[in-house]
Image (cartoon, helix red, strand yellow):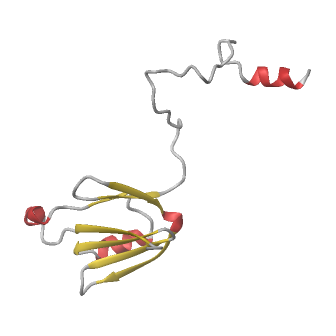
């Protein structure tokens, strides 16, 4: 069999018809993998709705300051500062790469939460090179 024949075999779909990459299903604009991968990301959600996710593999260091109630996370490309209250538990879970998402809560809603709850009021995102 020639090389073209091998590629024709690969390009045939389940029904034996050739797959045409220019014809995409308009009903499905986003295609997902069938199973989740092993990659771990952390998504930061700011109070205005902006989101940024960064891969844990690029997390270089973390620093918890109980006096300032801050956690500073240094990635290879970004520096993230979390401000809030009762952040020690969050810092511990960050060391284990457990959190998937950290959502900032506006200060006016802080009183609704329990006194011992972990609360992030502000997420400051900066680039390392700036």
Relative vertical location of residue 59 with respect to residue 10 in this rendering, above or below:
below
Relative vertical location of residue 17 with respect to residue 58 in this rendering, above or below:
above
Q: Residue 32 at what x, y percent from top left?
A: 50, 36
Q: Compare residues 106 and 21 and report the one nearer the observer.
A: 21
Q: From the viewer's perspective, is 94 left or right of 20? A: left
Question: Which residue, as the protein is rendered here, is positioned at the far right?
Answer: 1
Give the position of the C terminus as an image quadrant.
Answer: bottom left
Total labels: the figure holds 0
Q: Residue 31 at what x, y percent from top left?
A: 50, 33
Q: From the viewer's perspective, is 2 left or right of 108? A: right
- Residue at horizontal 36 percent and vertical 77 percent from the top: 72
Q: Compare residues 23 and 68 and report the one nearer the observer.
A: 23
Question: For residue 98, what is the image quadrant?
Answer: bottom left
Q: Residue 111 at what x, y percent from top left?
A: 7, 66
Q: From the viewer's perspective, is 34 left or right of 120? A: right
Q: Compare residues 21 and 67 and report the one nearer the observer.
A: 21
Q: From the viewer's perspective, is 34 left or right of 15? A: left
Relative vertical location of residue 65 with respect to residue 9 in this rendering, above or below:
below
Question: For residue 125, what is the image quadrant?
Answer: bottom left
- Residue at horizontal 22 percent and vertical 58 percent from the top: 47
Question: Which residue, as the protein is rendered here, is positioned at the far front?
Answer: 130
Give the position of the N terminus as an image quadrant.
Answer: top right
- Residue at horizontal 28 percent and vertical 78 percent from the top: 70
């Amino acid at each position: 069999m020639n090389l073209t024949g091998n590629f024709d075999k690969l390009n045939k779909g389940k029904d034996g018809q050739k797959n045409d990459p220019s014809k995409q299903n308009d009903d499905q604009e986003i295609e997902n993998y069938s199973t989740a991968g092993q990659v771990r990301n952390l998504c930061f959600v700011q109070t205005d709705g902006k989101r940024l996710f960064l891969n844990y593999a690029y997390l270089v260091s973390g620093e918890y300051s109980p006096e300032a109630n801050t956690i500073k996370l240094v990635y290879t490309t970004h520096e993230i500062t979390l401000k809030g209250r009762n952040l020690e538990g969050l810092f511990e879970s960050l060391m284990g790469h457990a959190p998937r998402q950290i959502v900032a809560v506006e200060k006016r809603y802080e009183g609704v939460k329990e006194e011992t709850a972990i609360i992030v009021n502000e997420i400051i995102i900066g680039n390392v090179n700036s």
